[in-house]
Every structure is written in C-alpha cells, then in structure tokens.
Image (cartoon, rainbow, N blue to C red):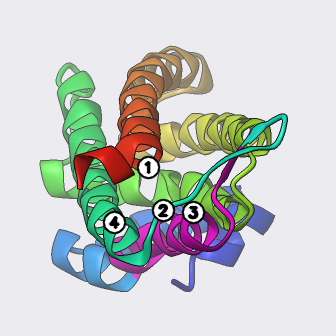
C-alpha cells in the first residue's frame, strides 16, 4: 500500500522503487491487490444497495443487501482474475526481449499499474452511470501512462519500443477492462433477476 501515493504523485521514481523490491506475487496480492480491489467492490455495494444505479430520467436500479453481497463477491473475484490475466499478457508480450521478467514479476507489475482503476471505484459510492464511465476512462488513461513509464524500466528497453509495447498492452488491457465492465454492468444491473 505504500506505493499508492507514489504512483499517483511521482510515478517515475515509484516505478524504480517497485522494480528494485523484487516483490513476490503472494506478498503483492496480500498487501496491495486484495485491499485495492476491495475499493470498487465495497463502494459499488454501498452505492447500489443504498442509492441504486442512476440511469437518468429518474430511473434507479437498487439492489437488496443479499444480492449486493453475492454480486460483490463475484465482482471481487473477477477483478482479481483480471490482474492475473494482465500479468500473463505482459509476460507473453515480453517473450522476445532478452531480459524477459517472470510471470510473477509481470503480475506484480500489472497489479501496480491497475492502481488508478482500483481508485476510480470510489465513484461507485454515487452510482451515476455517466460519472462512473468518465472517471473510469480517466483512470484508464492514467493506467496507460503508468504502463508507458514503467515498461522501459521493467524490460530495460528504450522509450520508442516502450510506446509500442505499452500501446499494445493497453489495447489488450482495454479489451479485458471492457469485458470486466460489461460483466459488472450485467451483474449489478440485472443481479436482482439472477439471484
């Protein structure tokens, strides 16, 4: 958790610190990912059970607490899986580089790069659809920036190569993010009918 502020305030320096730590996946998950992934889940649980999704024109979709908890657990597992998938994507894309990091290092890197997306979940306390989409898009842009500045340090490549690598990784990440977002909307929006 000590890297959260640094990733937002001085990402260049923080990425260098993260690289030097050589953190294990289990330590990273227990001290960063499990806690940060809880932010959007808890905020969405509170927002959807207390206020409901504001779809505009006075339309609200409010969940009962039991449905919200069941969907929250599912949402949490999807987020954790998304970080692991992105770690594998980064490892796969780095296959041609001489200093290819392990899957574990790639997963740790993916977890730190996802920090802005985790923090954007705070907006789900007031689940207004357009606001959640706007904040999510801004978080995605900052995640792309973290990829761009982190990849050269992580793979020991130059900035030009980093732009291609981070752009490709971000494109795949956007696809994973869209799938997660679609699952989230379906599950949170239609959850009362499912449970």
Q: Earlier in the sequence, mark 1 or mark 4?
A: 4
Give residue 50's position: percent from left, percent from top: 63, 74
Gap in Å between the C-alphas at discs 2 and 4?
6 Å
Which residue is located at x 17 percent, y 77 percent?
26
Relative to residue 172, is residue 112 drawn left or right? right
Q: In which quarter of the image is residue 87?
A: top left
Local secondary structure at mark 1:
helix
Q: Position of residue 43 (x, y in %)?
A: 58, 71
Viewer-closest of 101 and 32:
32
How far from the left and from the top, in percent, is residue 113? Answer: 50, 51
Q: Is residue 99 left or right of residue 180?
A: left
Q: Residue 188 carries which label?
A: 1
- Circle 3 crowding by C-alpha within 10 Å: few under 14, some 14–19, many from 20: many
Spatial CA distance of label 1 from label 4 is: 9 Å
- Which residue is under mark 4? 67
Of labels 3 and 4, earlier in sequence is: 3
Name the residue furthest right. Answer: 57
Residue 174 is covered by the magenta coloring: no
The residue at which mark 3 appears reads as 48
- Residue at image location 39% in from the left, 58% down from the top: 111
Q: What stretch is highlighted in magenta?
A: 32-54
Is disc 1 in contact with disc 2, using a CB cutoff of under 8 Å? yes
In this figure, which residue is indicated by the disc labeled 2? 63
In terms of sequence position, does the residue under pointer 1 or pointer 3 come before the other? 3
Residue 10 visible from this viewpoint: no
Is residue 49 found inside the magenta-colored segment of the image? yes
User: Is label 1 or label 4 in front?
Assistant: 4
């Amino acid at each position: 958790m000590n890297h959260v502020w640094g990733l937002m305030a001085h990402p260049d320096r923080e990425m260098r610190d993260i690289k030097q730590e050589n953190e294990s996946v289990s330590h990273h998950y227990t001290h960063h990912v499990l806690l940060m992934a809880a932010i959007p889940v808890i905020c969405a649980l509170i927002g959807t059970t207390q206020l409901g999704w504001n779809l505009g024109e006075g339309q609200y979709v409010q969940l009962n607490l039991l449905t919200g908890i069941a969907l929250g657990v599912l949402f949490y597992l999807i987020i954790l899986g998304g970080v692991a998938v992105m770690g594998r994507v980064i490892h796969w894309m780095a296959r041609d580089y001489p200093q290819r990091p392990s899957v574990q290092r790639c997963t740790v890197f993916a977890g730190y790069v996802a920090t802005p997306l985790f923090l954007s979940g705070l907006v789900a306390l007031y689940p207004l659809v357009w606001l959640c989409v706007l904040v999510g898009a801004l978080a995605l842009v900052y995640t792309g920036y973290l990829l761009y500045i982190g990849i050269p340090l992580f793979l020991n490549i130059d900035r030009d190569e980093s732009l291609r690598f981070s752009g490709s990784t971000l494109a795949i990440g956007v696809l994973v993010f869209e799938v997660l977002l679609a699952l989230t909307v379906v599950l949170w929006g239609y959850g009362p009918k499912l449970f």
